[in-house]
Each structure stands twice: as structure tokens, then as C-alpha cells.
Image (cartoon, helix red, strand yellow):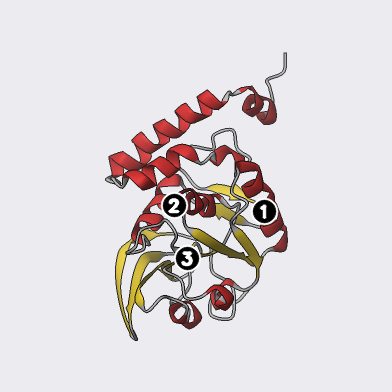
Amino acid sequence: MAAPDRATRRAELSEAEWALARAQMVQDQLERRGLRDEELLRAFRTVPRHLFVDSDDPYGDRALAIPSGQTISQPYVVAAMAAAARPQRGYRGAKMLEVGTGSGYSAAILAEMGAEVVTIERHPPLAADAVERLRAAGYDGVRVVVGDGSLGWAEGAPYHAVIVTAAGPSVPKPLLEQLSPDGGRLVMPVGTREQQWLTLVERHGSAFTGREVEPVVFVPLVGEHGFSE
């Protein structure tokens, strides 16, 4: 008898089994690496990651390929970026911009914590797919726009926090300008195409301070203020 295909294996799992997989993911990948924010951990226990990736191991400790040559980061990296970007006022009601929608998973995490999320994706097919996945998971309040993420989305500015899920040679000036001057926070991988540091920038008035958080490797941020195609 032939082995069941991936779609069949996924369909056979109950919601209770998916919930158990999420709880195990949080324990093994997030809590054991030092993440303690219960609001954040609750979101990761709640958001159905398996609806955002076509994989038979959606809760594994690794990045996963998605269409258009992009990836969805491993759960810990998504959590670490969300934790670093935590607005001073907290997530609930905060205006947050995500650059690099991908499959929509990170945006769903932010929305689950009550943030008002705008997410921008330069690949139209990915953006359209993310809209469907977000709707299927119950996060149709997330606004998905298509455009050059290195330019940000001025229409919704200022933002309490900006998360950039692709690496650039430097932090794009438009994203800095769109940060709230009252403690706005931006998290982004900065470096070469091959290796970067996850970097946190805070804005207070016209002053910006930054620090490196940890080494990472992300796909490049392509655009006017990023890498060339």
C-alpha cells in the first residue's frame, strides 16, 4: 500500500493534535530559549501555523520554503523579532508595520496579540495567498498591501513598531521616518546578503539609537532602499 501523501497526513490530524503540536513548539523552541512574555507565548500557542505553510512538519524548528523563492522563518525567530519590537504601550491597539508578508504567519501572531497590522509584500501572488490564509485562520483584519517594502507604507504612519522580515545593507530611511517619535521600535536584519545581525532601532523625537541583537540569515530586502534584484 502506498504511503499517504502530505495532504492526507495533514487532514488526518485533529485540531486537538495541532494544539498539542503548538504547545510543544512553545515549550521546546521558545521557552527553552528564554522567551517568557506570556502574551507572546499565548499567541504562538493559538495561531495555527499549519494553515500558513504547506509542510508535513509546520511546527518544526526550522525555516520553511514558500513560493516566489521566499521563506517563512522558524518559530523562534518570528517570536524573537516580535519580542524585540514590542511597543512600549504593549501590543494591543499598537499600530505595527511588517515588511515582507510571506505567508502571513508573523502578521497573524501580531494580530492575535491585538495589534493593528499593515503588512507589505512585493510579490503579488504571495500577497494574494497571504490574504486567503489570514482569512482562513480568522485574521481578516490584517491589511495586506503590495509594494516596495523598503519604502514602507506612509499612509498608515506613524507606527509604534516596524518589523522587517528581510535583510538590507542598512535600515531604509523611509522606515525610520515612519516610526513613532515617541519610542517607536524597528527590528530588522542588517548586513550582507550572506550574513546579518538582527538589529533593534528606537526613536525618541529626532534621535535614533540602535543595537545588534543576534546573528541571523534572511532573504534579501529588494527595493529602492534595499538590495538590487
**Looking at the rendered structure, which numbered label has been put on residue 88?**
none
Instruction: Give the farthest residue toward the front.
Output: 93
The image quarter containing residue 3 is: top right
Residue at numbered disc 2: 78
The image shows residue 223 at horizontal and vertical percentages of 59, 76
Classify mark 2: helix, strand or loop. helix
The image shows residue 31 at horizontal and vertical percentages of 31, 40
Residue at numbered disc 3: 95
Q: Is residue 80 left or right of residue 102?
A: left
Please name the amino acid that badge 2 sits on.
Val
Q: Nearer the viewer, mark 2 or mark 3?
A: 3
Please name the amino acid that badge 3 sits on.
Lys
Residue drawn at the location 68% of the way across and 63% of the way down: 123
Please name the amino acid that badge 1 sits on.
Val
The image shows residue 144 at horizontal and vertical percentages of 63, 61
Distance (Cα) linking label 2 and label 3: 18 Å
Task: Compare residues 68 and 153 and report the one nearer the observer.
Answer: 153
Classify mark 1: helix, strand or loop. helix
Classify mark 3: helix, strand or loop. strand
The image quarter containing residue 181 is: bottom left
Residue drawn at the location 34% of the way across and 86% of the way down: 206
Task: Compare residues 13 and 229 and report the one nearer the observer.
Answer: 13
Q: Quadrant of the C terminus?
A: bottom right
Residue at numbered disc 1: 131
